[in-house]
Amino acid sequence: MNTVITIIYLIGVPLLVMQLAKRWTWIEKVSPMSVLYIIGLAVANLLPSNNGIFNVDLDTNTLFCNIAVPLAIPLMLMGCDMQGWQVGKAFKVFLSGLLSVLLVTLAGYYVFRPGYNDSQGFAQVCAVATGIYTGGIPNMGAIKQAVGMPDQTYLYITSYDLIVTGLYLVFVILFGKVVFRKLLPAAKVATEKNAEKQQNGTASTEKVRPFDKEHLKTTLLAIALTLAIATISYAVSLLTSKDGSPNMTVLILLLTTLAIAASFLPPMKRQQQSFDLGLYCVYVFCLAIATACNVREMDIAGSLPILYYLGFIIAGSLVLQILFAKMLKIDGDSVMVCSVALVNSPPFVPLAAALLNNKDIVVLGITIGLLGYMLGNYLGIGIYHLLLAIG
């Protein structure tokens, strides 16, 4: 019974919020994702366990978390305009973000190491943190084994990472768009397209209308292509995995490549309804990821220097990245999606693009995330041996 109720909750609440957004303008102003994130956090942390009314089925919730993004990425990419893609800009944004993370990670090692009894142990923490915030969770596990980190320390890092990245995600959802666009130049492409929309009287991407009769045929084609792309990508990611779980680098890379290829099909070129349907998947993901964040089950007091260190990395790298962006004249949308791709990993890129109402930023963010996946292991293990050498 809980499984059925959870499915209705995860599918129905985003639809309800979207419908309410048409009547209540304040939901559009704060973003439906902000509302969904707050609802998910409230369900996870305020409802008592075994309340007899609604208990989330965690397996079902995890399933929705896992399938929403592989569906959202191709749907959103197929609705993008690939003609404006700039490789040079992508590398400039990525390198500024990468350098910010590396500098703050190394600086934080010397700031917080005195509060940690074991220097070598904290070098291991630094190595794994480097892997997380330049790559993602797959890099985290690989570096943990490579540097010989104890299981207990690894458990602390995973718990604290959920806390600090969760708080950062709250910041991005509630204030990110305003902060990044206030501090940095506006994205030219996004500005021009928004101005064009205002002149033509068209709606923003926040108003999802994928099932209008006028667009139903294209929508069904987008769904069919997405299911095919997701199935192929998932199958290949399993075949290339050594532990039986999907190879995330291969999965994201294939989803991106096949979706970009599909975007050039004549029926799919710059189709807004494909992006809108992907946006709905992002809403479902946002609700599911927030519902999974139960602070009551985390061991927060286990090893606080690690928690402070991870928080320092996220806050410090963000400040440094904004400073670099000012010097390099990088727009706020690109910096925000780069930061989300590095801190929260590529699956959160569609969420950032939806918040910015800039669908053409998806390719940039996923590219940055993939580069991070590829380099994360090398950087984490390299920094570990560097710290051991210099002390």
Image: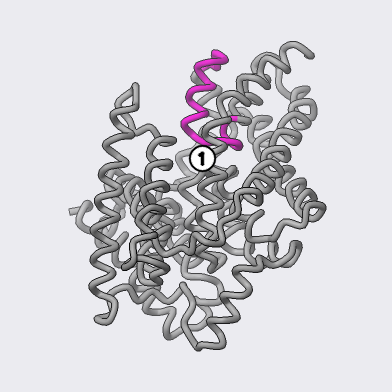
Image x and y of residue 242, in percent: 34, 22
Q: Is residue 281 magenta?
A: no
Q: What residue is rendered at 57% in x and 34% in y?
A: 132
Q: Among all residues in the image, which is located at the extreme left?
A: 1
Residue 337, given in percent of the width and then of the height, sits at 59, 54
In this view, the residue in front, 249 or 2, is: 249
Seen at 73% across and 67% down, the residue is 182
Please provide the residue range marked out in magenta: 131-150
Rendered-image quadrant of the C terminus: top right
Tag 1 secondary structure:
helix
Q: Quadrant of residue 306?
A: top right
Task: Return the residue nearer the eye: 225 or 39.
Answer: 225
Horizontal side, residue 375 vs residue 48: left or right: right
The location of residue 339, given as percent across then percent down, is 62, 49
Q: Residues within 10 Å of mark 1 (few under 14, many from 20)?
A: many
Which colouring convention does the figure follow?
one colour
Rendered-image quadrant of the N terminus? bottom left
Give the mark count.
Answer: 1
- Residue 297, above or below 41: above
The residue where tag 1 is placed is: 370
